[in-house]
Amino acid sequence: MEKNGESVVDPNSAIGGGVDDVYGEDRASEDQLITPWTVSVASGYTLLRDPHHNKGLAFTERERDSHYLRGLLPPAVATQELQEKKLMQNIRSYEVPLHKYVAMMELEERNERLFYKLLIDNVEELLPVVYTPTVGEACQKYGSIFKRPQGLYISLKEKGKILEVLRNWPERNIQVIVVTDGERILGLGDLGCQGMGIPVGKLALYTALGGVRPSACLPVTIDVGTNNQKLLDDEFYIGLRQKRATGKEYYDLLEEFMSAVKQNYGEKVLVQFEDFANHNAFELLAKYRTSHLVFNDDIQGTASVVLAGLVASLKLLGGSLADHTFLFLGAGEAGTGIAELIALEISTKTGIPVEEARKKIWLVDSKGLIVSSRKGSLQHFKQPWAHEHEPVSTLLDAVKAIKPSVLIGTSGVGQTFTKEVVEAMAAFNERPLIMALSNPTSQAECTAEQAYTWTEGRAIFSSGSPFDPYEYNGNLFIPGQANNAYIFPGLGFGLVISGAIRVHDEMLLAASEALANQVTQEHYDKGMIYPPLTNIRKISAHIAANVAAKAYDLGLATRLPRPTDLVKYAESCMYTPNYRSYR
């Protein structure tokens, strides 16, 4: 991409470009001096099959002549807007969400920019299609709907060769990697190699909602086998047919992967761990957070988005976080991650030690309330939450004993917030805050309708998967969705634009505060504690700016000098999916 030894595009200009957009790779509408896909094009046929550059009927008459496309396309010339209108009509005509998912994935493989244009312009409608809840079903059936591989598959067969495998990926400048081992996909359990749907979906959101360039994103699935017998017996299963490797064999493979990533892509590549089982998730985060730029969305992303909802809800509940008592159902990655971040925020705001702040927060697991008499048998990540109290075996008894003002569900088990539990919450709270966070919708602890009905319209409700607005006694309630998609794209983008080398808990607090600040009085009037997803790119820019500011303050940012207006800088770095013109 050089002319007379000089770069073709001014690297400092950021018109719709991306971070370090030296090659003008995603300049939205500028003429290119030479074709970006290859220096000599024998025929435009290859161009039409290249999703990064294909525009379908949107190629102009001049482009059809200069790029050998005459006769390869019907004579009509369409705009990107017209293509978008046609595809949205097609997608809306499908009744089954999985069919919509397949249609969107096929579009991504055919025309990348149009895929992102659709997703950005119709985010509230398409987010549940490309991500939770539909992506869960897609992962369960990934073997049967599998057509063309997306992302990198690293299995035990590649042991000792992971660096070579990374070099097989065509893109060199990777900024964000999302990696899973498929052991705990949403609330659906071990899906082995078929968990690839999750990293692919997450990275689509990094681009659409956070503005990271698609070419800078790499989805990875680490396949160490599966303990799901149904998959092992399925003739169409696409992964290794063996039980999961554990212990040293497992951690050695992960160590090789993490070292290869750093060697190949450098210090500033963000690695997001996704849907690992509890025992490995905590271990991997603790092991690599001091040596790599790593982030676990299930532990930290969920915590950050829930904390944002709690901070925003204080306008409706009154008081500060320290004035409230929190009770969790579920003490895994999400539950303990959220609890820890709440304690950290209380500690930061009040100056009391974190150990003291934890005493406002109680957790219930499958064996009942976590109390100090159980300490001997608890997993290490549950131990900080074992407070002095007599044993309590059920959630209902725990609610009556602790009298929390906030009830948070991260159990992965549907319908566990029963009528009695919710009515008990309403008995001693004017406005009980109920967060049923488990995904997909079928696993939610209670529905929006149940929460509003059982509390006679007094509850402030939010969930992990979307629920429709609900009318009760003439009032329309809009349930909040504590969707990680609010946080991780902006957080990741903030790390990328500042060139951060480590993720610090204070960055998660900064992301939560930025999100809470986007909730306006108009939203509160409808009972909302999260802003609508329609403004997500603006929200992401504010989150990215706040996170980047914290990275600079902590001395963890390497992109110098520090931009004066970080929000404007974030917006200028965001990928835009408009078509480019080719000469």
Image: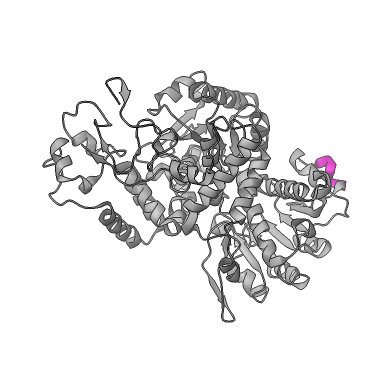
Rendered image quadrant of residue 439: bottom right
Magenta stretch: give its range.
373-377
Q: Above or below — where is 193 with respect to 188?
A: above
Residue that protrudes farthest toward the bottom in the picture: 474
Image quadrant containing the C terminus: top left
In this rendering, does residue 137 appear at all?
yes
Rendered image quadrant of residue 442: bottom right
Image coordinates of residue 212 in percent, x first then y, are 45, 40
Report the number of discs.
0
Image coordinates of residue 345 in percent, x first then y, are 73, 49
Image coordinates of residue 198 in percent, x first then y, are 49, 43
Viewed as shown, does residue 180 lie left or right of 44? right
- Identified at 37% across, 55% down, the residue is 100
* Residue 491 part of the magenta-drawn span: no
In this rendering, does residue 202 appear at all?
no
Colour scheme of the rendered structure: one colour
Rendered image quadrant of residue 472: bottom right
Image coordinates of residue 81 in percent, x first then y, are 28, 55
Q: Above or below — where is 499 with respect to 301?
A: above
Majority SS type along the magenta span: helix
* Residue 374 part of the magenta-drawn span: yes
- Name the residue nearer the viewer: 68 or 282: 68
